[in-house]
């Protein structure tokens, strides 16, 4: 009897195994056949594009960001603005878009849903109910609830607090200047943006720059446990501890944000929905609660579990967005301007004209008249050019049955593909930008008709359409403030040569152009090795 049972179990296992093998082979065949007749790099039916990607990766830094890889892949094989890449079973089948008009079809005209790849990265950092991961009516509803707090006019009423947190960042830089040490500019900038988001979103001082913060500690821990773009080691990929660590750090972040929200609402003034109070100087969370209560018809001004759950994930995604955009942009501004002294001189002259010659009064002038920030065209040009060269992210979308991309009179399928308008490749394409690899802030100051004038839709670090970044205005305001305070007081230079020499890796690979501060994937695109830097007083 026992022998019969063993045979029965063995047969059942064999049937399951055979079914699994059939499923894998069927998927394999469908994936490979789907590429027939489509523009693509050299293709192997057995291995897809893995062999040519492997060869390309061997010529680049091992940990460079996937969007950097797509840029070089297109250039190496002279691919058209729509091409396909198959990395199955190690990755997704991808439709790469490097054309602004086609990108418009993906993000605005149809606004395809976000691809699951984005959620896989974001959920450990910001949960599942955040504005990046949500789709459809749910996204539309919560986007409308949080929109008022991120309007430019409202953010201008919060400039005082942003300046205060930026001054703390200046104190951190001053300490490093005094110590004459090499430090991670990316980490210092990230802590500054966390403080700013905490103040803007919750009206709380998180003190991330001055002492160890449980939220920041958990957040940084999550980043270290995310998989790198080129990770193939199964012991790393399938490490069961990853889920345990993610859950623990999520609990730490939720506990921190929950406590801050409870403290905030315990002392919160009456909402506009109840007594018509002014929106000025109120954090994002207050305005969001006003909108939520008004929508719900709730006049009690109390926070309920639904709002709190969604709000907690939004606060975490805002923290993530600050880490995503502003901190990296600050790093690259310092890095690039140290190599372009003419541009540095021009922006310093602009600061003298707008804020006066007394550097010590810069912060006070901004506080007294925040709208001086709107009189910095060359600073804005620098920020835009930095974001062109070093975009923090792209928007991967899910292809749909029956939805085709139109380009030059031909149609290209999206079903079964991750449709990826690659900002890095778009913004460095020689088809769209004169001298695309060169830092030229004047692109953003010339008039239409000039050869440098940007093509509409070719610059997309914040994307377009209903899923464009909600924090655009905040990112620009805080970057302009930090930039003015930082550049007027300090000289900052990258210290990659010192880092490499100290680690015994003097000949560490760079990009083909010799770029050492290439972008790496740490949830988003970050400067390699945290941008090691030295700072001195100007």
Image: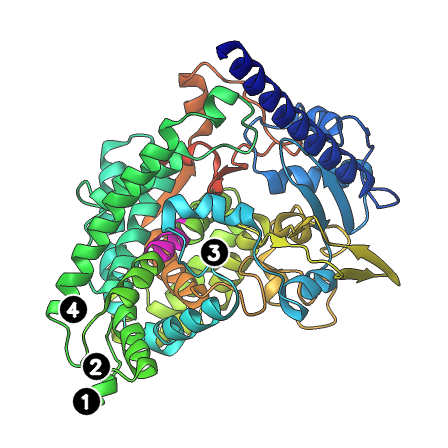
Asked if residue 322 lies in the magenta stretch, the reply is yes
Residue beneath label 4, please?
265
Numbered disc in front, either 3 or 1: 3
Neighbourhood count class around disc 1 (C-alpha, 10 Å): few under 14, some 14–19, many 20 upward: few
Q: Nearer the viewer, residue 381 or 536?
A: 381
- Callout 2: helix, strand or loop? loop
For the residue carrying disc 3, how many other residues have a C-alpha within 10 Å: few (<14), some (14-19), or many (20+)? many
Whether tag 3 and tag 1 are in contact, CB under 8 A, the answer is no
Label 2 CA crowd tier, 10 Å (few <14, some 14–19, many 20+): many
Q: Is residue 270 above or below residue 209?
A: below
Residue 14 at x, y percent in the picture: 63, 21
Q: Report if the CB atoms under discs 2 and 1 are less than 8 Å apart.
A: yes
State the image quarter where residue 301 is shown. bottom left
The residue at which mark 2 appears reads as 271
Q: Secondary structure at mark 4?
A: helix
What mark, if any, has residue 133 been given in the picture? Answer: 3
Give the side of residue 150 with respect to residue 442, left or right: left
- Report crowding for label 4: few under 14, some 14 to 19, many 20 or more residues within 10 A (C-alpha): some
In the image, what residue occupies the spot 63% across and 54% down? 398
Q: Earlier in the sequence, mark 4 or mark 3?
A: 3
Q: Residue at x 45, y 66 (%)?
A: 470
Distance from disc 4 to disc 3, alpha carbons, whole Å, reads: 26 Å
**Does the magenta segment cover residue 187?**
no
Residue 117 screen position, x and y as percent: 55, 45
Between disc 2 and disc 4, whose residue precedes?
4
């Amino acid at each position: 009897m026992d022998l019969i049972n063993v045979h029965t179990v063995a047969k059942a296992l064999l049937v399951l195994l055979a079914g699994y093998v059939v499923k894998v082979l069927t998927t394999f065949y469908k994936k490979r056949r789907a590429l027939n007749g489509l523009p693509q790099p050299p293709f192997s039916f057995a291995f897809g594009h893995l062999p040519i990607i492997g060869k390309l990766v061997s010529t680049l830094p091992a940990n460079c960001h996937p969007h950097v890889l797509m840029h070089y892949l297109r250039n190496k094989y002279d691919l058209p603005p729509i091409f396909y890449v198959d990395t199955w079973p190690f990755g997704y089948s991808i439709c790469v878009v490097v054309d602004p008009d086609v990108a418009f079809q993906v993000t605005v005209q149809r606004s395809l849903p976000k691809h699951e790849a984005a959620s896989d990265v974001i959920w450990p950092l910001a949960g599942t109910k955040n504005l990046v991961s949500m789709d459809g009516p749910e996204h539309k509803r919560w986007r409308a609830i949080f929109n008022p707090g991120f309007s430019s006019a409202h953010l201008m009423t919060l400039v005082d607090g942003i300046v205060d947190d930026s001054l703390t960042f200046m104190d951190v830089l001053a300490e490093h200047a005094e110590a004459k040490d090499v430090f991670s500019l990316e980490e210092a900038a990230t802590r500054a943006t966390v403080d700013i988001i905490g103040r803007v979103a919750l009206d709380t001082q998180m003190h991330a720059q001055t002492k160890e913060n449980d939220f920041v500690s958990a957040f940084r821990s999550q980043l270290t446990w995310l998989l790198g773009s080129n990770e193939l080691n199964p012991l790393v990929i399938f490490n069961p501890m990853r889920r345990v660590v993610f859950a623990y750090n999520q609990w730490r972040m939720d506990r921190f944000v929950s406590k801050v929200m409870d403290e905030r609402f315990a002392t919160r003034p009456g909402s506009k929905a109840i007594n018509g109070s002014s929106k000025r100087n109120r954090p994002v969370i207050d305005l969001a609660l006003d909108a939520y209560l008004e929508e719900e018809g709730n006049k009690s001004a109390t926070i309920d579990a639904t709002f709190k759950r969604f709000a907690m994930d939004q606060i975490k995604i805002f923290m993530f967005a600050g880490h995503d955009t502003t901190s990296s942009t600050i790093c690259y501004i310092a890095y690039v301007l140290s190599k372009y002294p003419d541009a540095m001189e021009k922006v310093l002259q602009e600061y003298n004209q707008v804020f006066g010659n007394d550097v010590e009064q810069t912060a006070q002038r901004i506080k007294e008249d925040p709208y001086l920030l709107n009189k910095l065209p060359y600073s804005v040009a620098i920020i835009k050019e930095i974001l062109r060269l070093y975009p923090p992210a792209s928007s991967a979308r899910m292809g749909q049955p029956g939805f085709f991309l139109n380009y030059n009179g031909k149609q290209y399928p999206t079903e079964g593909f991750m449709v990826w308008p690659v900002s890095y490749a778009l913004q460095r394409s020689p088809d769209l930008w004169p001298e695309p690899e060169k830092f030229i802030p004047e692109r953003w100051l010339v008039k239409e008709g000039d050869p440098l004038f940007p093509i509409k839709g070719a610059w997309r670090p914040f994307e377009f359409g209903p899923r464009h970044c909600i924090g655009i205005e905040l990112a620009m305001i805080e970057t302009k403030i930090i930039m003015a305070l930082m550049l007027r007081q300090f000289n900052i230079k990258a210290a990659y040569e010192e880092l490499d020499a100290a680690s015994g890796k003097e000949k560490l690979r760079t990009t083909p152009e010799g770029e050492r501060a290439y972008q790496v994937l740490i949830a988003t695109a970050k400067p390699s090795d945290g941008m090691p830097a030295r700072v001195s007083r100007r």
